[in-house]
Each structure stands twice: as C-alpha cells, then as structure tokens.
Amino acid sequence: MPPSALPDGEPVPDDGSLPPEALAQWGERPFGLYVHVPFCTVRCGYCDFNTYTLEELGGAGAAPGASRATYAEAAIAEVRRARAVLGERDVPVSTVFFGGGTPTLLPAGDLAAVVAAIDAEFGLAPGAEVTTESNPDSVTAADLAELREGGITRISFGMQSAVGHVLHTLERTHDPRRVPAVVEWARAAGFEQVSLDLIYGTPGESLEDWGTSLDAALACEPDHLSAYALIVEAGTALARQVRRGDVAMPDDDDLADKYLLADERLAAAGLGWYEVSNWARDEASRCRHNMLYWTGADWWGVGPGAHSHVGGVRWWNVKHPAAYADRLAAGRSPAHAREVLDPETRRVEQVLLEVRLRDGLALDALDGAGRSAVPDLAQRGLVEADPHRLVLTRAGRLLADAVVRDLLP
Ligand SMILES: C[S@@+](CC[C@H](N)C(=O)[O-])C[C@H]1O[C@@H](n2cnc3c(N)ncnc32)[C@H](O)[C@@H]1O
Ligand code: SF4
C-alpha cells in the first residue's frame, strides 16, 4: 500500500536549521527523542503507519538506504544532525521511544547503538525512560536480555487481543500464548516497566471476547496498558473490507460498552487511567515519553515520516526510507516541511490534548466562550472542575470529542 501523502507546509532549509525564537525555547520543557523504525514482517490489515515489508522495499535487492541492515546508521546520522541544529547547550534527554513499525525487527545491538549515540550527543538524564515497542513474535528471551543490557528500560508489546478469531480478523501473526511468555522473559531480563497494547471493537469481537482479552492482559500483571478503539483508516485492507460489506464498521455503542468494561476491570486490578486510552499502576509507570507529547513539550523525531516539535515549530521528515537515507547521505536535512505554530494554534492543541489527561486541563487555556461552557458540562456529569482545572468524568471520557467541541466553540 503506498503511504498517504505528507501534509504541505513551509520549506525547511537544507541544513534543517530552526528559527532562533524556537531554538531559544529548547530546554525550557522536557526533551525527548522518538526513533521511528519503519519495518514490519507483514502489514496488518487495519494499520496505516509508515512501515514497509521487505517486499514493499523491493526484497533483498532494496536500495541500501531502505535496508534494515543500514537503518541504524542513517538514524544515528540524524541524531548527530539534531545535535548540530540544536547546538551545544546542555539539555539532557529525558525520554527515548523506539516506535514503528516493529523496532525489534532490528538486531538489539542496532537499537543499543542508537541509544549510545543519543547519550554521546546529548547525554541521557539520570533515570531516563527508554522504551521500545515490540511485536510478541519478534523477540526471544535472549533479544530481551540484550535490549535491557543495551539501555532499553521499558518495553511495550502489541498484544491487541487474546482471542484467536479477533487476532485473525486483525491479521496478527502471533500465537496469543506467546504474550505471557514474552512478558515473563522481559521481567527476567530486568525490565521494570512492561506495557501491553490492546485494540477493541474489531468486527466479530463480542463483549465477552473483550473481557477475555482484558483478563488475559491483566494476568500478565503489566505496569501499563493502552487500549485503543479500532480505527478504520482510509486506504487500509480493513477499510476495503468494510466498504465491500464483508465486515461491519465498529459500532459506537459497542465501543462505549467495551471502554467502560476496560476501565472497570483495569481499575479493579489497580491500573488507573491517566490519559483516556492509557492506564498505569502508579505515577512512576506512566509513559513519560507520551506525556511529553500530550503536554506540548519538545521532541526530535528521528526516521522516515517522523514528526518533531521544538519551541512551537513542528516539522516532519520525508516518508520513504530510501529518500530519508539519501537526504542524510547527501548531508541534507531529512525534513520534508514544517509549520510555525501561532499562539492560538498552540492553545487549541493544548486544549485538545490536556483535556484527555487525568491531570486535567488548566482552565486558563480556555477563552471566554470555552470557560462559559464548563458549568453546563459539569452539570451534565461530563467534567469535574475546580477554579483552576477540569477533568473528564468516566462518562465524559466516552464523549471526549463532544466535550472538546463545547470547550473550543
Ligand atoms: C504502530 S503499532 C507499533 C507496535 C507494533 N508494531 C505492534 O503492532 O504491536 C502501535 C499500536 O498502535 C495501535 N494501532 C495501530 N493501528 C491502529 C488502528 N487502526 N486502530 C487502533 N489502534 C491501532 C496498535 O494497538 C499498536 O499496538
Ligand atoms: S505490526 Fe504494528 S506497525 Fe506493523 S503493520 Fe502491524 S500494527 Fe502496523
């Protein structure tokens, strides 16, 4: 499937340099690095992430830049460029996140080499969180030990479901019995933070199936769990199946029932929500890297299609791995385009993201019209508000988009 087009924006200088006003803000907020790894063994029918199978990259004869073997080298080249663009100021990295794609398709040593390059260029802050996503069938016990040894501190497994027919509809390749095994290997390797991703609302999934998946996930005793409603993304195999009438579109009432079941079971097991789709055992188990996105902090996104944000400037890289590696090899920035966010856009984004957090939205991010909507939302039981912040109730979390429409009239 060809990846969808990138958004337009302002051009980025060849050296990737940032406007001085943005650069001056770097270091005022926590700083993290996202490293995108754009490879998967097969493409799941629902997924529109920027990822490629070997076949999509032209098989074994792929262009050097698009090959898994040379990927870490290209990513490290971008880490060095990031340092050159941001300058020598001492701003240690508080979080690193390898996402994909399937980062653990790369040898553990390659991920460790990228972590080492980040540490050498910027310095990792003491206690830095270094996460990798992983598919349950892409790691062995030995890989996990090597990843932990190589500086990865947190691992997130794409479990999705524990039910065979649901995994089959999602075109997932792993055996559900593999999940408890990989979690156990991760613990044995010394990972203190283990997270699981689940998807609910897959066509054919009953409420009982969803309960089975939640129970199976909880039996693994994760520190963190993400549960996402299945989104039918345009251009995916799933969207074509829905269009042909082969499978039904996820139903809103069914999704709401499944969200409530998740929140009840997870809370009863000691996992509290801290973002609408994310639950953690305690504050230390929250994903600090994702918190950085949700609170408008700064991050540099390494890799094809990766997005970055520093001091109100957002940019995104060229999408194809070969184009990405070619740009870096030619000594150019891999950024495709950028936008400078004006204060009003930053405020709107803050409302959209912070309203979804357990820590709530600061009321001074609202304009007069937004603030005047708060008493009615509270009366309808959708938010709880004090003079400074508002937090979604459980009913409000089901209607988060509608709440946002009232807060941003
Ligand atoms: C891009 S994947 C990367 C991790 C790994 N490759 C995997 O699939 O497990 C990150 C997570 O995004 C979620 N995801 C991807 N596409 C989705 C969709 N269309 N609807 C809902 N969740 C989706 C899945 O839960 C997945 O675990
Ligand atoms: S393994 Fe993960 S990233 Fe790869 S296609 Fe499936 S959902 Fe997307």
Image (cartoon, rainbow, N blue to C red):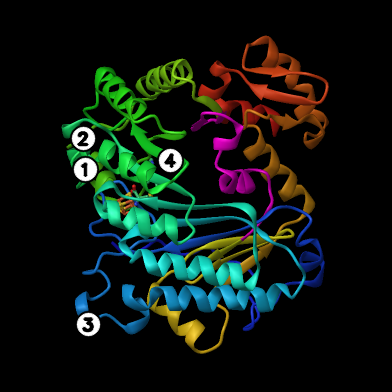
Circle on res. 247:
2
Q: Amino acid at mark 4?
A: Val
Q: Which mark sits nearer the N-terminus, 1 or 3?
A: 3
Which residue lies under the disc numbered 1? 241
Q: Indicate if the residue with disc 3 has its beta carbon within 8 Å of ligand 2.
A: no
User: Could you tell me which secondary element the residue under label 3 belongs to?
Assistant: helix
Q: Which mark is residue 300?
A: none
Q: Quadrant of the N terminus?
A: bottom left
Q: Amino acid at mark 3?
A: Gly
Which of 340 and 180 lies nearest the eye of the viewer? 180
Alpha carbon separation for disc pair 3 and 4: 37 Å
- SS type, badge 1: helix
Q: Is residue 43 left or right of residue 91?
A: left
Image location (x, y in percent) of residue 223: 46, 34
Q: Secondary structure at mark 2?
A: loop
Query: Pointer 3: what residue?
Result: 61
Q: Is residue 156 left or right of residue 309?
A: left
Count of numbered circles in the view: 4
Q: Quadrant of residue 332?
A: bottom right
Tell me if I can see residue 67 in this picture.
Answer: no
Q: Earlier in the sequence, mark 2 or mark 3?
A: 3
In the image, is residue 376 part of the stretch drawn in magenta?
Answer: no
Residue at 76% in and 26% down: 389
Find residue 13 and report its horizontal and vertical position in percent.
66, 80
Which amino acid lies under the numbered mark 1 shown in the image of this protein? Gln
Question: What residue would you read off at disc 4?
Answer: 194
Task: Give the mark toward the camera: 1 or 3.
Answer: 3
Range covered by the magenta-colored residues: 274-299
